Image: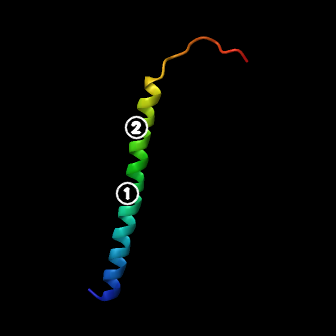
Amino acid sequence: MSAHAWFVFAAYAISLLAIGGAALAILIDHRALKAALARLPDDDEETPA
């Protein structure tokens, strides 16, 4: 492989890791927020406007 091909491969690998890490962080945060919302008490009473 030429030096250019290695550079392109490395750039794609780093990008994949960065985007994958961001997506994983979003999914973990979503699960945590969903669990926190599930722990909130249900308030079925009408709130005054």
Q: Which residue lies under the disc numbered 2?
A: 31
Tell me: residue 37, above or below residue 13: above
The image quarter containing residue 31 is top left
Question: Dividing the image into 4 quarters, which one contains the N terminus?
Answer: bottom left
Q: Amino acid at mark 1?
A: Gly
Q: Residues within 10 Å of mark 2 (few under 14, many from 20)?
A: few
Q: Residue furthest top?
A: 45
Tell me: residue 21, above or below residue 8: above
Kind of element beneath mark 1: helix
Residue visible at 37% across and 71% down in the picture: 12
Residue visible at 31% across and 81% down in the picture: 6
Left or right: 6 as drawn, with respect to 40:
left
Residue visible at 40% across and 49% down in the picture: 25
Q: Residue furthest bottom?
A: 2
Kind of element beneath mark 2: helix
Left or right: 46 as drawn, with respect to 37:
right
Q: Residue furthest right?
A: 49
Q: Amino acid at mark 2?
A: Arg
Q: Position of residue 13 (x, y in %)?
A: 33, 69
Sequence-earlier tag: 2 or 1:
1
Between 31 and 40, the one lying in front of the other is 40
Q: Position of residue 34 (x, y in %)?
A: 44, 33
* Mark sitting on residue 5: none
The image quarter containing residue 47 is top right
Q: Which residue lies under the disc numbered 1?
A: 20
The image quarter containing residue 2 is bottom left
Q: Residues within 10 Å of mark 1 (few under 14, many from 20)?
A: few
